[in-house]
Image (cartoon, coloured by chain):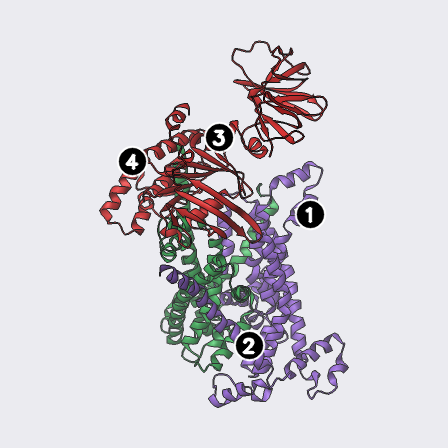
Chain colours: A green, B purple, C red
């Protein structure tokens, strides 16, 4: 659809994006508030940030979260990519319907159910809840998101590239590493980033599957938020937002730059035939 | 030899994620199902899993006990006012004991449905504006919609507490411009939950709507106007019907997770806001009733099966 | 094209009973579920031949090529290459290489890495790979593009990289799947001749799949015309055009007029075909039809003459009708002459002199005439 923006369009876009961004913006602004009272502005200060760095509990939680996210995103990316390959390439095998269901179900499954069921599993097999169980839980639900991201890339993947590699003497395994993986790599990386932030943000599943000594940052934030809004929490949230936003924007700018360069190259090349 | 290797590799590609999901996704559900059928008395408090107790629990899981479901079913039936007598006869537990369960289910569905409608009303003009925007601006707008999706859900919900609470920013603003004298009570009400859901799930609504509207050929609307349609009637007769697949996908994407939502009702809703995700959480963490929370989870899943199947159908149709 | 024809006239191993075919399809069938893509097909292709598989989409030509490359296994029958049964041999171990319709150039590799890919798989030493890649780049005249990525190339250049890559391993047989399909018309015509020259120079066996009959006729020594997974005719381009084996081939290759009728006489002096409404066509005897058989007389538009007067030649067939349509194309003029309600004949007349004033115009009465040996009698 193409057309010109009417006044109505402009107003709805401005209001819509204001609605999406104002709350976050206010949160960020009030993290620099001098006052202990979060909602009364009494001057600019970064004292809450410096206070953060002396809060050992918070720092520990952040470190746990970071490690969980790093490990779980990496495993989830491997498993999710394998699952995506299975979904797009192995169209007939016993139990395919079940497999497809298991990949897609966690995407819409209420988190309370996923969390509860994984906890009961860990109890049943006698696994003590802690770092390991949160990581396993995060791998499980984020691999499905990775699978969906990579699958959508594989669906548009030109199969003749793989056939060409095999035609030229590459075995299937070597074809995967020399051709398929490099071509789908951007999707695999976005899958990893998604898995990483999902793990970073998760409260519900972590609450069910984590144990003493493995409190994650969202769990820490949640327990403090229940007691009320504090400028300190605003500061933590601001750092988290800045971290994720920088990553996402940098990735998309990089992507965009590559696309622009590519389009320019293609246009230049087209002239050669004339 | 090489062929054997490649056959084994391709088996492994299937087997590894398959085994993982079987063990970490399907098996847990079977356990939830079994525990949901077990008795309240043997429920174990969390955080102190006594080995004997757990063993005992799993040993006794074989004895099927539909009591938890009976409780829930009677609740539900009692709520709609039918079959109450049927339930009462012959069972030891009175269904009036826990009416809040059925109330929580009904109220979850209601809150999710109302918020979905509001999300659609807010999201449609945004998606429409994005689709009408110049080609060069669209990637940026799209990025702006997706970006909040990457930021923590918890943080986004938390951000609203400071705005909505009685001494919060909204009330300050409204008081200062003289619109109100008394602070509005929004925090800890269903209204706050609606706002939280609309805000948190807005990207899920806008994205499918945008992708449906973006595909729309603008010349269709011009053709309708050329044939005598006024702009508003052209919208209702051409644009809206053609965007219906996006509307359906967006509504389901908001409705399904909203039904089982925990964080939003817990942080923004009050003690009178009943939602099933919150109930499950408190049954589990506060009352330590594992069998009942498992039964609640199973019923919640059963309620969501229909919209999930609808959603998958809609997706399949969109891809075909 | 004429000169190429004369060079290659001596090359006709298919007429030599002592020659052994290089590639044999033996009763090959390929099913995809209920769909039969290739049906009990047998075909022989000789060494150094430029062979074309021609047919509409879905006729099984690409499936045939993919079975030879090893991407599909036949459901029944077998394929032999140089006497060796290819069954069960995976694509990466077959001595054939393929040039893909989409070119399938690896987007993340430079032109030279693309061309050297196959050599690297064979474990060839680096220096040798570099030498061979340089040789290939020279062959396709892309020396200065070695470091570019595929997206930095034009369509024509990509096509040549794909060709160089598939030739780099010096395969026994090169398979080309619609090799020129993505090029525009002018470039396509030039490249057709380049491909033929290259094939002659390298002395390889080329098998090309195409839906473009002009392309097949320009390049190939022999053409197999496929329909619904079966071979309709295998012959040289001239034979396919002048002596189609069936009504399908006649209609598929070029334009044709068909007269249906019943054989009335079949003797030494020729055949008489009764086409109804009192029209009788005299045709050269083509053998197998008996009196009373239903046959079709097929004749190409350029072999018919249109005139305002009935021609004097008593031997020639002449039918009277009315000019229904005229299309002036510059080099020739196409007339559509309506003989009766159900019968409109196309005739292509070469404009050998400058046309100042066409004597024939719309709704004129006109005669369409042709010699008995100008067309063929089809029994199938």
Q: Closer to the camera: disc 1 or disc 3?
A: 3
Q: How much space separates mark 4 and mark 1, taking CA atoms?
A: 62 Å
Element marked by disc 2: helix
Q: Which residue is mark 4?
A: C138
Residues indicated by labels 4 and 3 sit on the same polypeptide chain: yes
Q: Which residue is mark 3?
A: C214
Q: State which tag comes first along the sequence, 4 or 3.
A: 4
Q: Which mark is residue B236?
A: 1
The answer for which chain carries disc 3 is: C
Residue at position x 57%, y 80% from top? B34
Label count reads: 4
| Mark 1–mark 3 CB contact (< 8 Å) | no
The answer for which chain carries disc 4 is: C
Q: How much space separates mark 2 and mark 3, taking CA atoms?
A: 65 Å
Residue at position x 44%, y 64% from top? B11
Q: State which tag comes first along the sequence, 2 or 1.
A: 2
Q: Closer to the camera: disc 2 or disc 4?
A: 4
| Residue C78 visible (yes or no) | yes
């Amino acid at each position: 659809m193409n057309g010109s923006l009417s006044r109505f369009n402009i107003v709805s876009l401005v209001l819509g994006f204001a609605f999406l961004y104002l709350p976050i913006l206010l949160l960020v602004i009030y993290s620099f508030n001098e006052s202990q009272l979060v909602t009364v502005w009494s001057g600019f200060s970064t004292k809450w940030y410096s206070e953060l760095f002396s809060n050992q509990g918070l720092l520990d939680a952040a470190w746990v979260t970071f490690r969980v996210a790093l490990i779980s995103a990496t495993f989830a990316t491997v498993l999710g990519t394998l699952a995506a390959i299975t979904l797009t390439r192995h169209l007939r095998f016993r139990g395919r319907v079940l497999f497809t269901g298991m990949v897609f179900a966690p995407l819409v499954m209420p988190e309370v159910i996923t969390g509860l069921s994984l906890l009961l599993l860990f109890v049943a097999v006698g696994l003590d809840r802690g770092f390991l169980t949160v990581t396993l839980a995060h791998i499980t639900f984020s691999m499905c998101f990775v699978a969906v991201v990579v699958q959508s890339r594989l669906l548009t993947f030109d199969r003749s590239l793989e056939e060409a590699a095999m035609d030229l003497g590459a075995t299937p395994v070597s074809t995967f590493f020399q051709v398929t993986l490099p071509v789908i790599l951007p999707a695999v990386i976005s899958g990893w980033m998604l898995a990483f932030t999902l793990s970073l943000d998760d409260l519900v599943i972590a609450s069910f599957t984590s144990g003493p000594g493995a409190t994650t940052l969202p769990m820490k934030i949640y327990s403090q938020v229940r007691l009320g809004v504090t400028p300190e929490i605003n500061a933590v949230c601001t750092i988290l937002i800045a971290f994720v936003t920088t990553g996402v924007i940098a990735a998309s700018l990089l992507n965009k730059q590559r696309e622009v360069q590519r389009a320019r190259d293609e246009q230049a090349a087209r002239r050669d035939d004339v | 030899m090489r062929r054997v290797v490649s056959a084994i590799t391709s088996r492994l590609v299937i087997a590894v994620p398959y085994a993982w999901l079987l063990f970490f996704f399907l098996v847990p559900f079977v356990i939830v199902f079994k525990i949901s059928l077990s008795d309240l008395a043997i429920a174990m408090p969390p955080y102190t899993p006594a080995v004997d107790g757990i063993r005992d629990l799993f040993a006794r899981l074989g004895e099927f006990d539909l009591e938890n479901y009976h409780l829930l079913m009677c609740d539900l039936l009692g709520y709609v006012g039918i079959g109450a007598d049927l339930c009462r006869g012959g069972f030891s537990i009175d269904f009036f004991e826990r009416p809040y369960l059925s109330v929580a289910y009904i109220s979850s569905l209601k809150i999710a449905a109302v918020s979905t409608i509001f999300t659609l009303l807010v999201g449609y003009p945004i998606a429409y504006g994005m689709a009408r925007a110049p080609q060069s601006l669209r990637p940026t707008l799209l990025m702006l919609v997706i970006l909040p999706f990457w930021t923590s859900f918890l943080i986004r919900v938390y951000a609203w507490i400071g705005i909505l609470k009685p001494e919060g920013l909204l009330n300050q603003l409204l008081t200062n411009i003289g619109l109100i004298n008394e602070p509005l009570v929004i925090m800890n009400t269903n209204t706050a939950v609606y706002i939280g859901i609309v805000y948190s799930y807005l990207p899920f609504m806008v994205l499918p709507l945008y992708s449906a509207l973006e595909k729309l050929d603008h010349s269709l609307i011009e053709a309708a106007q050329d044939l005598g349609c006024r702009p508003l009637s052209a919208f209702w007769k051409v644009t809206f019907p053609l965007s219906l697949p996006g509307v359906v996908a967006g509504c389901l994407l908001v409705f399904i997770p909203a039904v089982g939502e925990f964080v939003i009702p817990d942080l923004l809703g009050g003690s009178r806001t009943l939602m099933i995700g919150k109930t499950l959480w408190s049954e589990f963490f506060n009352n330590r009733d594992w069998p009942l929370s498992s039964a609640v989870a199973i019923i919640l899943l059963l309620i969501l099966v229909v919209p999930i199947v609808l959603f998958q159908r809609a997706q399949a149709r969109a891809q075909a | 094209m004429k000169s190429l024809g004369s060079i290659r006239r001596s090359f006709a191993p298919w007429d030599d009973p002592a020659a052994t075919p290089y590639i044999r399809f033996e009763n090959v069938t390929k099913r995809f579920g209920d769909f039969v893509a290739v049906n009990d097909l047998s075909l022989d292709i000789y060494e150094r031949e430029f062979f074309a598989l021609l047919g509409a989409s879905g006729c099984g030509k690409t499936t045939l090529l993919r079975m030879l490359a090893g991407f599909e296994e036949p459901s029944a029958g077998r394929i032999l290459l140089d006497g060796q049964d290819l069954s069960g041999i995976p694509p990466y171990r077959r001595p054939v290489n393929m040039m893909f319709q989409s070119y399938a150039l690896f987007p993340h590799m430079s032109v030279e890495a693309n061309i050297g890919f196959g050599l690297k798989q064979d474990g060839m030493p680096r220096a040798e790979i570099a030498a061979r890649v340089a040789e290939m780049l020279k062959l396709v005249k892309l020396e200065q593009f070695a470091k570019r990525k595929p997206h930095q190339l034009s369509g024509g250049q990509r096509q040549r990289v794909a060709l160089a890559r598939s030739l780099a391993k010096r395969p026994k047989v090169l398979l080309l799947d619609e090799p020129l399909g993505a090029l525009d018309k002018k470039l396509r015509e030039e490249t057709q001749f380049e491909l033929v020259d290259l094939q002659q120079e390298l002395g390889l066996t080329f098998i090309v799949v195409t839906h473009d009959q002009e392309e097949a006729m320009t390049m190939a020594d022999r053409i197999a015309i496929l329909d619904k997974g079966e071979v309709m005719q295998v012959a040289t381009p001239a034979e396919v055009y002048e002596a189609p084996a069936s009504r399908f081939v006649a209609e598929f290759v070029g334009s044709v007029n068909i007269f249906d009728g019943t054989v009335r006489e079949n003797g030494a002096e020729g055949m008489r075909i009764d086409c109804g409404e009192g029209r009788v066509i005299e045709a050269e005897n083509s053998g197998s039809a008996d009196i009373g058989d239903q046959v079709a007389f097929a004749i190409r538009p350029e072999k018919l003459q249109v005139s305002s007067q009935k021609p004097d030649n008593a031997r020639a067939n002449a039918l009277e009708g009315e000019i229904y349509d005229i299309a002036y194309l510059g080099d020739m003029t196409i007339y559509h002459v309506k003989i009766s309600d159900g019968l409109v004949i196309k005739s292509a007349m070469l404009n050998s002199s400058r046309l100042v004033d066409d004597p024939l115009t719309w709704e004129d009465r006109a005669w369409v005439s042709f010699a008995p040996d100008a067309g063929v009698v089809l029994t199938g």
